[in-house]
Image (spheres, coloured by chain):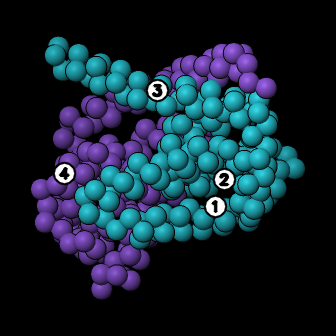
Chain colours: A purple, B cyan
């Protein structure tokens, strides 16, 4: 039976879960903002440029992947807009980024449920790289 | 100073974007519970939970995480742990699945908008999540003692 109590309970659970998650989300959000403003990500991206041919991608697309891994999909797509890419390359980036993105924020959330940050990040990056590589080998080669 | 204010405003709108999904979904979950619809959804997911040897009540968290994203999924899992005592092993496996495959509508549509092949994208994502979860579910022992499963989750780097 649905009563007003159902809605009250749902609302209460929603708010208490939000507070629970905010304890992580707020500090992590600020860290990510600082990281984004500091220019560190550009340095990492430059370092990763040579690896990109592994996925059949141009060197400068390393910035797209690094922004996606650290900040999130939207930041990555913003950086991608200026680039000339083939349909296969776009799908390769899409696969890599949908599997692994916003790693700092999301692994902090997952930590709340007792899952180690190392386990969740390494699984995501591993499969991101693996699927990106396989996709390029199968469709791009 | 204006940079700090901007970060604060962004932070608030970020929290609001989570709240406006999380609160309605928690209400929906309560409605599911009170109408016993949650049992039907769990039944529907039984082949999936059985395949990954998960606790039966995990289906709903998996569903919400897949549709609405990892943060919402994590919220639903936090709640399901309180409500149904979902074991640590199941939580670990669901999170690993959801880590690779969540918010499938939002993520895929954005990617399709910039020209990605949405079918290839979804297949790649599901494949990765299923392979990872299947392998982990065969490696991690069924929950006889919770402590053993926790060790594995901490140790698998």
Callout 2 secondary element: helix
User: Mark 3 = which residue?
Assistant: B20
Question: Is residue A8 left or right of A68 when viewed as pictured?
Answer: right
Residue A33 place in picture, x, y as percent: 28, 32
- Establish if A17 lies above or below A79: above
- Establish if A67 lies above or below A47: above
Mark 1 or mark 3: name the one nearer the start of the chain. Answer: 3
User: Mark 1 = which residue?
Assistant: B133
What residue is rendered at 50% in x and 50% in y? B102
Say if mark 3 contacts mark 4, CB within 8 Å. Answer: no
Circle 3 residues within 10 Å: few <14, some 14–19, many ≥20 = few
- Establish if A2 lies above or below B78: above
User: Mark 2 = which residue?
Assistant: B93
Give the distance between the C-alpha atoms of the residues marked 1 and 3, in whole angstroms.
Answer: 30 Å
Chain ID for label 2?
A: B
Residue A68 place in picture, x, y as percent: 32, 50
Q: Is residue A42 visible?
A: yes
What residue is rendered at 31% in x and 65% in y? B116
Circle 2 residues within 10 Å: few <14, some 14–19, many ≥20 = many
Chain ID for label 1?
A: B
Circle 1 residues within 10 Å: few <14, some 14–19, many ≥20 = many
Can you tell which mark lies on residue A41? none
Quarter occupied by residue A1:
top right
Q: Quadrant of the C terminus of chain B?
A: bottom right
Most distant residue in the right direction = B144
Quarter occupied by residue A57:
bottom left
In depth, the one of B59 and A111 nearer the eye is B59
Residue B153 place in picture, x, y as percent: 66, 49
User: Mark 4 = which residue?
Assistant: A79
Let me know if marks 2 and 4 both belong to one chain: no
Q: Is residue A117 visible?
A: no
């Amino acid at each position: 039976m649905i009563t007003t109590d159902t809605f009250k309970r749902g609302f209460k659970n929603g708010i208490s879960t939000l507070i629970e998650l905010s304890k992580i989300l707020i500090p992590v959000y600020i860290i990510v903002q600082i990281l984004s403003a500091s220019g560190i990500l550009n340095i990492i991206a430059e370092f990763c440029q040579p690896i990109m041919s592994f996925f059949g991608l141009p060197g400068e697309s390393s910035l797209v992947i690094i922004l996606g891994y650290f900040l999130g999909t939207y930041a990555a797509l913003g950086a991608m807009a200026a680039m000339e890419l083939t349909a296969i390359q776009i799908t390769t980036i899409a696969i890599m980024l949908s599997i692994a993105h916003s790693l700092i924020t999301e692994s902090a959330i997952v930590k709340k449920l007792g899952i180690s940050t190392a386990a969740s990040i390494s699984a995501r990056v591993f499969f991101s790289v693996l699927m990106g590589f396989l996709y390029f080998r199968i469709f791009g080669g | 100073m204006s940079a700090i204010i901007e970060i604060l405003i962004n932070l608030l709108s970020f929290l609001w974007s989570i709240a406006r999904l999380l609160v309605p979904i928690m209400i929906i979950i309560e409605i599911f519970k009170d109408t016993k619809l949650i049992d039907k959804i769990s039944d529907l997911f039984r082949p999936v939970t059985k395949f990954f040897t998960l606790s039966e009540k995990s289906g709903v968290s998996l569903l919400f995480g897949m549709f609405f994203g990892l943060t919402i999924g994590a919220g639903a899992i936090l709640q399901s742990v309180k409500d149904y005592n979902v074991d640590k092993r199941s939580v670990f496996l669901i999170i690993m699945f959801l880590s690779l495959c969540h918010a499938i509508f939002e993520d895929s549509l954005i990617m399709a908008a910039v020209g990605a092949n949405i079918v290839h994208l979804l297949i790649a994502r599901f494949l990765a999540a299923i392979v990872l979860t299947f392998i982990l579910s065969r490696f991690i022992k069924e929950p006889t003692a919770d402590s053993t499963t926790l060790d594995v989750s901490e140790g698998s780097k």
